[in-house]
Image (cartoon, rainbow, N blue to C red):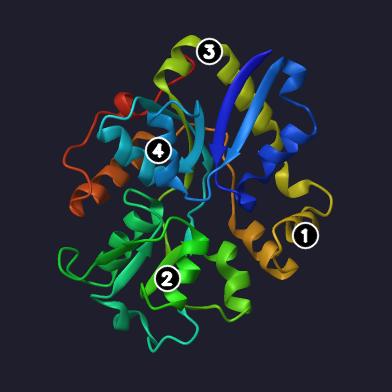
Amino acid sequence: MKDVRIGGVPEHFNYAWYLALKQGYFKSHNINVRWKDYFGGTGQMTKALRDDEIDIAVILTEGIIKDITEGSPCKIVQVFVDSPLIWGIHVAEKSAFKQLSDLKGQRAAISRFGSGSHLMAYVNAMELGWDTRSDLEFEVVKDLDGAVEALTNEEADYFMWEKFTTKPLVDQQTFRRLGDCPTPWPCFVIAVRDEFITNEKETLQVILEVINSITETFKEIPEIDAIISERYQQKNEDVKNWLALTEWSQENISPSTVETVQNQLMQLDIISEKLPYNELVANLED
């Protein structure tokens, strides 16, 4: 039995992995997948990949590309979710901020530096015409619970996180959402440590085949909206809206998408150099 360590956020996007584990699909191929939830998101996972705590991560595209350009020994092997991630821009319910322009120069809560909440704050600032050098301040809060505490106690002013994950907090009037900021690229990819790609290529290919067989027909699973609604404590209508907007992928990331992401990160001074496609992406067919 091959032991494989996989990490991802504990969100509805990754329910397909839960199904594969629950149904024993990996074990039927003599693979023992140990899944770990990363509540701190992409920044926490990039560190886990570097530290050899996990072999594979289901991770935000922009975050892993940034980390690979900074020396992380990993490659992207596939797009997992092809549609954009819709980041909600939230303030505390009782906050005096009423519109996005009010947030210029205010403190953005981020899970950690290099995380999606950090990088997308730059994307949002650029789209709003702010000066990304002077109009952004950051407060590290580790995770969603930390963001709730920081915004409620006025230790940070706004927080960007996937809008459907935070929707229950909006419904409970803990957060108020001022707007959305979709990623201009596919949101989640599957990234793997170079060592694992080299030594366990066949195992990796089987893992991808298993998860792809689920995501190909994910929306056709009977009552999938009700199942996700109950598991993730979300309103059924919100889950239906999310499912309508979300498309999974079984293909690798394209050179044009990699170019778009790197150009955006360069423009925002988040990365200092661009890498060739084959230094960021592994083709398992080779």
Q: Which amino acid does label 4 sit on?
A: Thr
Q: Can residue 216 be seen in this view?
A: no
Locate the C terminus and report the quarter of the image it occupies: top left
Residue 46 placed where, x, y %?
Answer: 40, 38
Disc 4 from disc 3: Cα separation: 20 Å
Which residue bears the numbered disc 4? 46
Pick the front one: 255 or 90: 90
Q: Residue 150 carries which label?
A: 2
Residue 230: give its label.
1
Instruction: Identify the residue at horizontal 37%, vertical 86% (top origin).
Output: 97
Residue for point 63% across, 78% down: 171
Q: Earlier in the sequence, mark 1 or mark 3?
A: 3
Q: What residue type is labelled 2?
A: Ala
Compared across the picture, whether 279 is left or right of 161 comes to left
Q: Nearer the viewer, mark 1 or mark 2?
A: 2
Q: Which residue is drawn at 27% across and 43% down?
A: 262
CB of mark 1 within 8 Å of CB of mark 2? no
Query: Label 1 to label 2, Cα distance in Å?
Result: 28 Å
**Decide: marks 2, 4 in contact (CB < 8 A)?**
no
**SS for dot 3:** loop
| Cα distance in 3D space between marks 1 and 4 | 30 Å
Whether pointer 1 and pointer 3 mark residues with C-beta atoms closer than 8 Å, the reply is: no
Where is residue 162? Give x, y as percent: 51, 61
Nearer-the-camera pick, 30 or 268: 30
Task: Give the foreground label among 4 and 3.
Answer: 4
- Residue type of the residue flagged with mark 3: Glu
Image coords of residue 225 (percent x, y):
76, 58
